[in-house]
Amino acid sequence: TSVEKIIEKVKPKSKWIIDQQRAFELYKPFTTERNYIAGETHRYLGRQYKLVINKIEKGKTTVSIAKGLMTITTPKDNIERIVLDFYKDRAGAIFEKILESLKQKFPQFDTFETILSHKYLKKRWGSCSINGSILLNTELIKASKACIEYVVLHELCHLIHPNHSKDFYRLLEDLLPNWEKVKNRLEQSLA
């Protein structure tokens, strides 16, 4: 396509594009780079937990969450890997539970076969293919349950409307009237 043709198509939307770019500037990362050291805070299901590291000579690595603390007891040195594996392990069960809960709550999705998986994604919270494969970003395990439910419901709506059409947003609005507030909370809490 020629540059002139691109400009012809983009120019009428230029104000909207600039507005979107400004809006996304608000979501630039506020979180400092993680060092995975004692005293640092990490999020899990929408709450902050202070990292406590108990080094042991031998034994099995454990991670526990209680009373505002994420306590890691381990003979290993790679705390980052332990935390990421903890998130990965917890995400599978929690995401599956939320998916099943939403399918029970909204029977229009119950007829669809879904396959849920998750992995660390750089640019999106989730995706859904027409065959019912839902992929979620493992990072969602850091968000509140309401935020995770929003993303799962968003992807379920794609089973009925595979694009972001007016019908898609109408369905999402019918099922979750405050979805925009929840989306904004997600974007801001995990920025």
Image (cartoon, helix red, strand yellow):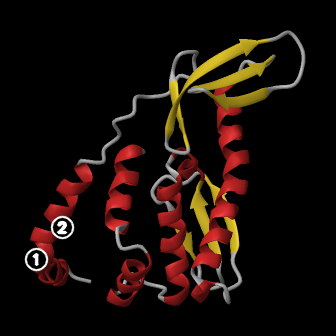
Tell me how far mark 2 sits from mark 1, CA to CA: 9 Å
Disc 1 element: helix
Q: Residue 39: in sight, yes or no?
A: yes
Q: Amino acid at mark 2?
A: Ile
Quadrant that contains the C terminus: top left
- Residue 154 in percent (x, y) is at 48, 72
Q: Is residue 3 left or right of residue 175?
A: left
Q: Which residue is mark 1?
A: 11
Closer to us: 87 or 32: 87
Closer to us: 105 or 70: 105
- Disc 2 crowd, CA 10 A, few/some/many (<14, 14-19, 20+): few
**Residue in view at x 51 percent, y 21 percent:** 40
Q: Dividing the picture into quarters, in which one does residue 20 lie?
A: bottom left
Quadrant that contains the N terminus: bottom left
- Residue 34 in percent (x, y) is at 50, 27
**Residue in view at x 71 percent, y 55 percent:** 92
Q: Is residue 74 left or right of residue 189?
A: right
Q: Is residue 125 left or right of residue 69?
A: left
In the image, residue 146 above or below residue 99: above
Q: Residue 191: in sight, yes or no?
A: no
Q: Which residue is mark 2?
A: 17
